[in-house]
Amino acid sequence: MTAGDGKLWRISFTVPEGAAAAFADAVAPFGDSISCFETDGKGARRLTAIGAGEPDASALDLMLATTGAAQGIEPPRARIERVPADGWLADNRRRFPPITAGRFFIHGAGYEGIKPPGALTIELEAGPAFGSGTHETTRGCLIAIDRLAKRRRFLNSLDLGCGSGILALAIARAMKRPVLAVDIDDWAVRTAAANARSNGLGALVRVAPGDGFSGREIRRRAPFDLIVANILARPLVRLAPDLVGALRKGGVAILSGLLHSDQAALIAAYRAQGARLIRRHRLGDWTTLTLGR
């Protein structure tokens, strides 16, 4: 099954809040887009993975059992279902109301409402790529970008794990400077590039495939004075040496995708590489960190 056949697969299951980060990391290989939302106001979290290609049910069951055992809980029961891409997109549009984050106003294609005067407007087609701005992690990054843009202009920026490209577009819109957007998923690369063109930012936003900091484009354009990475806590901890190494002295990193319980380990990992905490911002259960080198 490939993305080109117009079919996507969705995995969904519910876990306690304290286990959400571990299960999000574990399910990442099964999907191109991972989301986590509160379900009942009592701490349960609904994890959803969307990807092209039918997931291996046996491998998924093993992952759930292994992660459940490590977390000391019963493994959740996952639902696997096929979703037509056009149906997923229609559902995504219905659930994607316009949002405001700092000066940014993000809306879907076809929005005909009033745009706030003076707002930095971005039209977004998230598709199956993560990042519509509705999640607290993305909004936290947008607020951090807006705050930084009011103080300085970053000449060379990187959006690592760009998904829909929303953060790269925000940097380009606010700072009018070049941005490199990188993602391991081909669908995300295509979506981000299309969003850059539709927003008139194709000349500023370069989108390229890449896994971590090993990609040719990252190596060619480093060091960066701004790096934004909205992924997951454990990959961010593993990436600490490479990320700080790719950051220019005096540069800034915005890191998100973190539950509050994740931040201590992340701050420690980055301090060990010579980075310092500038600011932390909380939205709901999620924290966005701004670090400096």
Image: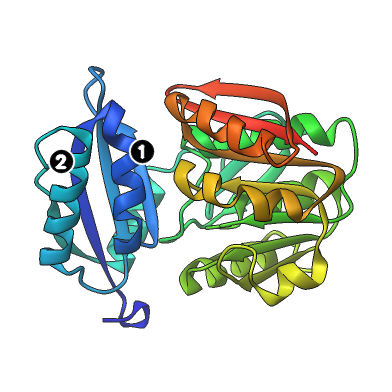
Q: What is the distance, in whole Å, between disc 1 and disc 2 at their CAs?
A: 15 Å
Q: Residue furthest front?
A: 272
Q: Is residue 267 left or right of residue 184?
A: right
- Residue in front for this viewpoint, 122 or 20: 20
Q: Residue at x 34, y 62 (%)?
A: 29
- Residue in front for this viewpoint, 78 or 212: 212
Task: State the colouring used for the structure image.
Answer: rainbow
Relative image position of residue 57 (x, y in whole percent)? 12, 65
Please, is residue 4 above or below residue 104 in the view?
Answer: below
How many marks do you count on the picture?
A: 2
**Disc on the earlier residue, 1 or 2:** 1
Q: Please, what is the three-letter code of the amino acid marked with disc 1?
A: Ala
Q: Quadrant of residue 211?
A: bottom right
Q: State the mark number for residue 21.
A: 1
Q: Please, what is the three-letter code of the amino acid marked with disc 2?
A: Ala
Residue 41 visible: yes
The residue labelled by disc 2 is 69
Please, is residue 217 above or below residue 94 in the view?
Answer: below
Labels 1 and 2 touching (C-beta < 8 A): no
- SS at badge 1: helix
Relative image position of residue 138 (x, y in whole percent)? 55, 40
Q: Residue at x 53, y 26 (%)?
A: 264
Q: Residue at x 19, y 55 (%)?
A: 63
Relative image position of residue 281 (x, y in whole percent)? 61, 23
